Image: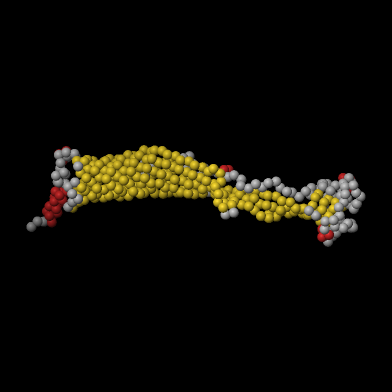
Amino acid sequence: MLRERDLTAIQQDSAEALFERSPLANADRWLLRISPGLSFQRFGKISADGRGFLSSLSVPRLFNSGPPNLPQVGSPTAFDDRTYDDGFVNRTGPTGDTGRTWFWGYDRARQVDGSGNLVMTARGSRSDYREGYQDLGGSGFSDTLQGLASRLDLSLAPPGHLHLPFDEFLVSIAFFHDEAGRDFLSFVGEQALDHIRLETRDTYQTSGLILPQPGYRGNPVGPGITLPNIPLTREESEVIENSESARIESQVSLNFELDSFSLSLGPTFSGPYDEDWQWKLSTGPTLNFYQYRLRQREQIHATVDGQRMAVGNGYRDSKSGNELGIGIFLRGTIARRLTEQWTLETYLQGEFAESFRVSNGVSSFQVDPSGYSVGLATRFTF
């Protein structure tokens, strides 16, 4: 009876006979095997430091305040001509000596308060512009580049009589494309225009005087009833009647696009493990060529009364370039022979490559291309 160990050896020899010792396996010439395929590639990680080029100095002023309309009431501590909404108190010749004037007038009886003093008011207006901004400090983010990659493998199998330490020499060419980006705000702010009502209330010492009837108008030459040219008291107030405002946002759109071309070279070691099935292990250096495009767009927007509009010319920048890098790869493959010349393969490949940095002088990306891919390919042997 055959022992179990002997039976296992016979099965192993049968698998080798079926897979490796075909008429092509031990040919006396070099064999070329071509394997086109697709893979899902997790290319690696990018870390971005997004910054805004525009600043708050780029924001134009949206509101025009115009000149103020101040009450013409002069100084409360010096002789002057004073015009009110309900009267006037001007200087006359004796004013410089006595401080009093007969060139005055008032409109309404209610201007005389409970103390018998005469109250006059004047209104004006002013518009105050204000603005404020907050720098949000840019946007740092990370993302993973991944997607489908196309691959073409060329394998050279040496003649059996050479007895090389490997079974094939792999030349693998792959192309991968992906992009990543973010939109963010670099700064926000507000512009506002406050419309202010100004009011001056002057009280003149007239208690003890018999005032003429409302509507009285004195004249510059006199004579007439006199009152002080300088008010006894002055009260001034400011009230914001309404405001106009605009919310300001500087929006940045940052995009990074990458094309990767890789050439992997290395020996392949293989062996059968079942009928028509084979395992493979490949490793070696990788030469990587990268083409990148870094695009940055910025536009300042203002929202006024619910309407959003672009402000200024914005900023546009695009930078393209190339990078070369080296790395290593390690691939494990499971292959099933379909016919004498056709084989179906699936593989898992890890890739380790040096990182590189891309910058446009404002924003930057750190690219780590190390990753892995899972693929499926068909192989034809010439």
Q: Quadrant of residue 153?
A: top left
Residue visible at 14% across and 46% down?
A: 22
> Which residue is outermost to the left?
1
How far from the left and from the top, in percent, is residue 243? 65, 53
Q: Can residue 327 be seen in this view?
A: no
Residue at image point 23% right, 42% down:
155
Residue 63 appears in the figure: yes
380 on left or right of 223: left
Left or right, 122 with reference to 251: right
Q: Which residue is drawn at 21% across and 48% down?
A: 343
Is the residue 86 above or below the residue 361 in the image? Answer: below
Q: In this view, does 179 lie above or below 117?
A: above
Residue 174: percent from the left, percent from the top? 31, 43
**Which quadrant does the N terminus fall into?**
bottom left
Q: Position of residue 32 (x, y in %)?
A: 21, 41
Where on the picture, by quarter, is residue 328? top left
